[in-house]
Amino acid sequence: MLYFARWKVLAILATVLVGLAFLAPNFLSVSATNALPSWLPHKHVRLGLDLRGGSHLLLEVDINAVVRERLNTLVDDTRNALREDQIGYTGLGVSPANVVRLTIRDAAQVDKAVTKIKALSHDIRQGALGTSVADIAVTNVGPEISVKLTDVAITDRATQAVAQSIEVVRRRIDETGTQEPIIQRQGTDRILVQLPGVDDPDRVKRLLGKTAKLTFQLLDNETALSDALAGRLPAGSEVVESENERNGDGSPVKYVLKSRAIITGEMLVDAQATFDSRSGSPVVSMRFDSAGARKFGEATTDNVGKRFAIVLDNKVLSAPVIREPILGGTGQIEGNFTVQTANDLSVLLRAGSLPAPLVVIEERTVGPGLGADSVRAGGYASIIAFVLVVVFMQSAYGLFGLAANAALVVNMVLLLGALSALQATLTLPGIAGIVLTIGMAVDANVLINERIREELAQGKTPFAAVEAGYRRAMATIVDSNVTTFISAAILYFVGTGPVRGFAVTLMIGIATSVFTAVTLSRYLVATWLTRRRPKLLVV
């Protein structure tokens, strides 16, 4: 136990030096670390929201909107399917209870209509065996037919909507240049967003609050706006308000549009904020993929002289006249933009549309000053805990306490170096985990030193007592640290936010403290014993 092969000594020294190398950048400025060669460690410890300051948002995905979208699509598909077979119906629409209802005029065609509607279902695979379940349930009472989504379908769509929303939110946040955001699912329909260092949370909230569903739709020139507002709106058309244009009384200008989109935002491959070459005003330039370019070219060729609307989140941004075919797959959006709003819109379009609106249900802002106070208070607590532990170990165990204290210093170096290398986020509870680690780091040395005292009391020589002390305490040390590590791992995988921050520092601290308390302190004690060879040992 007290003999160390040369490779073991080199491994111990290399571990300590690596820890120092990863810790060192934390004492340098960001500009200084960026100037270091790329092969050298240059990462700082990542500070969480509560230490660095920033914004905390809890978003809720509007699952009801996802359900309504599927039902609205089902209404259109039902209309087309029944028209193909010339099945008469009335009252087709979605009720407030999220049920599609319609009445078949001819009772003899009810069964045929039910069969046609059931054929519109989508199969959902579930379970380990991959069994398929229909996403709609069709029932009828006489000529009245009801269609609703099954529970499996609602759950499946909710899961997909949240997963897709997280990806879109991540892309939008990345486009703003925010570093080290925390974006994770919380519960079944919520998304937690933490943005350290963000000083303009309102802009981020506006970016996340927009669905960014972009469509290009033709105007319905055959229907007067007055007729549409009076309820004489033909099937396949809709009334949409303008985002920027206003009437003389201040009310938004309204347009009658064809409901079918000639092109959608999914066909965009790029969007950039630029300036119009003629007016010099900010605009958003866009570029479509090959399929989008073809459709856009066909639509503009067939409708020269007509107007089409650029619609974002059910608001008309602009409604220009198609003066000539647009065949290059590029275009621009005009809408009385400022430089900031044009840039924000380009960010939204590049990141893609959300499957459903996001609602901010909780918002907190942590100021940099409060974060700095937390860091200062946590630092004071760590220093006080460190000093008290060092004084206790030195006074209680003398030279052996000195070895334990040296191991404790190296433990802190390795712990902070590991946090920098792994880029684990340090939070205020994480500082609490560091303080706890300081106390736990000397537990093993206390067990070892007490065991050595017992062996000396039995009359053993210094070498034999130290050998037996380390060997017999090893099992207890391993058991206690493994059980604590398991508890910390459970906290990490089950907990969220601050709980995970505490668990991270605790797990890293356990690993480094076992190394320093058992291996490093044993090496220091063994080196001293082999050089001094004392005949009397006082612990």
Image (cartoon, rainbow, N blue to C red):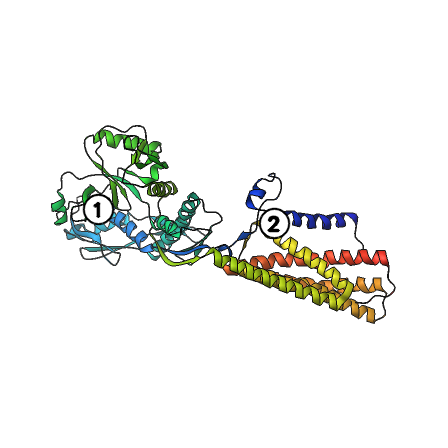
> Residue 445: x, y in percent?
72, 64
Q: What residue type is labelled 1?
A: Glu
Q: Which mark is residue 304?
A: none
Secondary element type, mark 1: strand
CA–CA distance in space, label 1 to label 2:
56 Å
- Quick check: 284 left or right of 477? left
> Residue 82: x, y in percent?
20, 45
Closer to us: 28 or 274: 28
Secondary element type, mark 2: helix
Seen at 22% across and 32% down, the residue is 322
> Splitting the image into 4 quarters, where does residue 300 fall?
top left
Q: Name the residue under label 2.
A: 27
Q: Residue 241 carries which label?
A: 1
Q: What residue type is labelled 2?
A: Phe
Closer to us: 152 or 51: 51
Closer to us: 27 or 23: 27
